[in-house]
Image (tube, grey):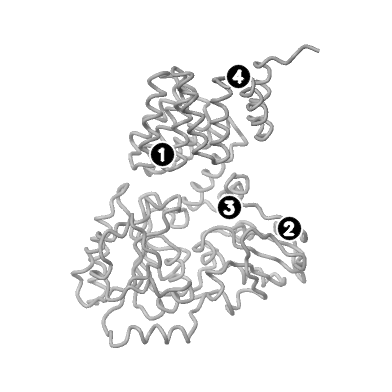
Amino acid sequence: MAAVTLGELLQKGLACHTAGRLQEAEQIYRQILAQVPEHPDATHFMGVLAYNVGKNDVAKIYLRKAIALMPENSACYCNMGNVFQHEKAYAKSMVWYKMAIELNPENQKAHSNLGVAYLRLGEPEKALESIQKAISIDPEYTDALVNCGETLKAMGDYDKALAAYNKAIAISPESVDAHWNRSIIWLTKGNFRDGWPEYEWRWRRPKTRKRLFATGALWQGQPVAGKTLFIFEEQGLGDTIQFVRFLPLLKQLGCRVIFEVGFPLIRLMNDTGLYDRLWVGLKDVDTRPVDRFDFYAPLLSLPGILKTQLETIPAQAPYLKADPNLCRIWKDRMAQDNSFKAGMVWAGHPDHSNDVKRSIPLQMFRELVPVEGVSFYSLQKDKHDQWTDMDSMKLFKKDFGPEISDFADTAAIIENLDLVISVDTSVVHLAGALGKPVWTLVPFEPDFRWLLDREDSPWYPTMRLFRQPLFGAWEPVLKRVAQALAKKVQG
């Protein structure tokens, strides 16, 4: 039998790599490097593989070595840019993409990924230019079409974004990103009929944690009268607060509902009457050996299973309530304050994919200070340096953040307020679920639940939306909030 050449071995490693069999690929690349330590392609692909598994520091070592071995190889520079982009170091990633393009102006991946970096840095026009260059090089480059859709969406052109996703799906019917993004467009435009079924593509996204169950079957709308149905939270805390409204509809179908929720929401969700039994969710634990149920479903699949339309959203509020004892405790902390009391949240968590668009520097809220007759209270539990650019006590009568232990405390505080003013975080969902007046500050590219071109929300009857008129423009939003607040206090 003829000996396998290094070239054949490399092709085998690449085949494993492309198929997602990363351990096999790594073994083959290491086998090559054991024979030829300076093998340029094996070094390069080891760097790509390290990036694929999230070992960015290792990836940089291999890629720098590959660049030293192949200084004219555009792909090496592009992949180094990908590593920095994964670390959200977008400006650094752009340097590498531009070097890749200088070496090979036809490198469509570098053009497309440079566009993504521009978009993340808040320059959608430059992003679109780069991505359209990639598409001109390869009109069937699916990733570039998806990136084009994302950029057009950020610019407010939802119809063209949808067209880009449709084209990507026509070329690559199994493109998870294209389907997922198309679902968001449809939901944002109020097309729930197509949007909710397409939203199920989230389960094919690599970052979506899949649950494994030893009992029961996935509920997809089968008759459940007399059965036990297990519902589990799956996304953010705000999502859980928003979508628990669907649990009573399940009980109306005649089934017993078990609801699982994580620790931050346990006290808030306790004794709500929305379910029959509450379970505490444990991190990285699917179900325990003693768990028994007939069907299971993720919480955010319920509107799709129940065929929810805009007109049929169960929007009755309040559907959550604050603990009366906690309400009394927090009321005592606001004693002798007979002014109009407004709670405020200015930032979400920095790890959120949309945080740069939704969070606002605290300094900008000084626009509200001149409004007479208002006491401001901070509901911001965690202070993030990126957005907390002033001493909070110069703005607030009290900063309750350090004293808040969980959402039960936040709910009790909100019950003692006249209004909540917040960026798009879980707090606005909590205020809406409690039936309290809440003003939500919405970025130009809104989350799908806030829809388009309206100041009210079909999800929360007590909510008013204040939208950015342009990408990144918060100043006019806060001016409108200040005017509306003055009018509300006076009225």
Real-space CA distance between mark 1 and mark 3, rounded to the nearest whole angstrom: 22 Å
Question: What is the number of the mark on residue 273?
Answer: none
Real-space CA distance between mark 4 and mark 1, rounded to the nearest whole angstrom: 43 Å
Q: Mark 1 or mark 3: which is in front?
A: 1
Q: Residues within 10 Å of mark 4 (few under 14, many from 20)?
A: few
Provide residue 207's location: percent of width, then percent of height: 57, 47
* First in sequence: mark 2 vs mark 3: 3
Q: Residues within 10 Å of mark 1 (few under 14, many from 20)?
A: many
Q: Residues within 10 Å of mark 3 (few under 14, many from 20)?
A: many
Dot 1: element: helix
Quarter-of-image position of residue 477: bottom left
Q: Quadrant of the N terminus?
A: top right
Measured along the vertical axis of the image, is residue 128 above or below residue 376?
A: above
Q: Which residue is mark 1?
A: 151
Task: Give the amino acid type for the residue marked by disc 3 in the picture.
Answer: Trp
Question: What is the number of the mark on residue 213?
Answer: 2
Provide residue 114's location: percent of width, then percent of height: 40, 32
* First in sequence: mark 4 vs mark 2: 4
Q: Mark 3 or mark 4: which is in front?
A: 4
Question: What is the number of the mark on residue 36?
Answer: 4
Task: Give the amino acid type for the residue marked by disc 1 in the picture.
Answer: Thr
Provide residue 449's location: percent of width, then percent of height: 47, 57
Q: Residues within 10 Å of mark 2 (few under 14, many from 20)?
A: some
Kindly check if marks 4 and 1 are in contact, taking CB atoms under 8 A apart as contact.
no
14 relative position to 354: left or right: right
Q: Which residue is mark 3?
A: 196
* First in sequence: mark 3 vs mark 4: 4
